[in-house]
Every structure is written in structure tokens, then in C-alpha cells.
Image (spheres, grey):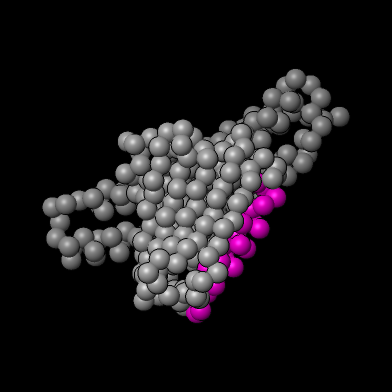
Amino acid sequence: MTTAVPLYVAILVAAAVAVATAAVAAVLASRQAIRTREQASRAGEAQRLAFLGTLATGLAHEIRNPLSTININLQLLKEAWQTPITEREQREYRKIEMLLKETRRLEEILNNFLEFSRTHQPNRSPCNINLLLDDVSDLFAPQAERQHIRIVRNFDRRIPPISADRNQISQAITNIVLNAIQAMPGGGTISVRTSLKQQTAHIEIADTGAGIPPEAADRIFNVYFSTKTEGTGLGLSITKRIIEEHGGTISMKSAPGEGTTFLIDFPATTV
């Protein structure tokens, strides 16, 4: 016979998750506050940011370990309660599922934060941008099909290889395509296009989603800003940093009800 999940277990787990959430929020808020402090000199600000970045990264790693332990134990609890019978047991099972969802969300926040805080030097080599976009599109094809989303590809074969870190550019494009898919829960179309413009590799990734309000458009690449209720606000910031580290530029045009288009250009020096 199944026994109810002890109340103290749920309380302890919820408390641990709350502490982890508060710690991450405090770190992110502190870092952003120091970043925007205008009265400090540039040299002093750089030193403080470097110190806080090191501190925040270390704290994030420390949070990650107990969070993983919480996640594992919640999964074990869920397995033990796969067949809840009574109404009380069903309520407890739903609590476990909710806590699991929150721990996964925290893990995603930590992973994105750690990725953003790292400094990467691109490991450049000749990269076929059309093939890279094709591979990313193939990666998301099953998920897009389940959500009734068409991925339309139109590549300019004249574009020569660009000098880039393939893994980093793949990550940047992945963030954009994932945003496009999430913007169209009811289905739609994602258009992935390339063209050669005055020896510049030009990329457009457009969706037919709801679009982004004008008041949010100017902040879309800001750190910790997100138009999604569960977004971390780091995905597009990471994308922008990667592209700019490769000497490229990224911009966005959008309007409510008309979808969103991201435009990426790599200058002639990298083509």
C-alpha cells in the first residue's frame, strides 16, 4: 500500500529550491547593478565586474551541485509515486511534478548564466554557413513538425566559407530558431535565407509569430530581458556576443501580428 509523501520532504525541497532561486536572483541583480553604475571610472568598473563575475560564477557552480541532488531525489520520489490512488496522493504527486519543473528551470538559468559569464576565444576555421544553417534546421525539424511549423530554406550558394567557430555560430543560430519556434505555439513558418551582398554574408531568420511590441524591441538583446514568462533573458544576449566576437552584426525587426526577423551580417574580412 502506498503511503503519503511526508509533508516535511515537500517543505524541505521547496525551501531548497527557494534558496537557490533567491541566490541566483541576487547574483544576477548585483551584477546588473554594478554594470550600470555610471559614476565609477571605467578601469574601476572593469575590475569590479571581473571580480563579481568570478564570484558569481563560483556561486553558480556551488548552487548547481545541491540543485542536482534535489533534482535526482525528486525524480526518485516521482518514480515511487507513479500510481497515486487517493486524492491526497494525487495532490502530493502534482507537487513533486511542480518542484521538478522548477528545479529544471533553475538548472537552465544556471547553465545560461555560466555560458554567458565565460569568455570564449573563437576557434576559427573555414565554415560553410549554408551547411551550418541546414544542420540547425534539420535539428529542429521534428519539433517544428510536431508544432505544425514549416521551416523554409533558401540559400545563396555563391557565399564562400566564412572564418568562424562552427560550434559557437551553431549555438547563436540555435537560440534564434528556438525563439522562433516558441513564438508560434499554434504553428506557422520559419524562413531561413542567406544571400551574398557586396562580399558580405547576409542571414535572415524570420517567423510568422505574434511579433514583439515596440516597447520591448529596443531591449531584446539586453542581458536578463525576456518577453517570455519563463525566459532567462540570456539566450539572445549570448547570440549577440558570439556574432560580434566574430566581427559580425545582428539586428531585429518586428511588429505585433507580423512576426519577427533577425538579420545577421558577417563583414568582408571574415568572408
- Image quarter in which the C terminus is found: bottom left
Is 133 colored magenta in this rendering?
A: yes
> Can see residue 73?
no
Q: Say if 217 sits above or below 167 in the image.
A: above
Residue 215 in the figure: left or right of residue 121 = left
| Residue 257: % across, % down | 46, 33
Residue 173 in the figure: left or right of residue 55 = right
Q: What residue lies at 86% left-to-right and 29% top-to-bottom?
A: 1
Residue 246 in the figure: left or right of residue 32 = right
| Residue 146: % across, % down | 70, 42
Residue segment shown in magenta: 125-144
Q: What residue lies at 30% left-to-right and 49% top-to-bottom?
A: 32
Magenta residues: mostly which secondary structure? Answer: helix
> Can see residue 5?
yes
Q: Say if 2 sits above or below 39 in the image.
A: above
Quadrant of the image occupied by residue 97:
top right
Decide which of 225, 246 is in the foreground and name it. Answer: 246
Which residue is farthest right? 1
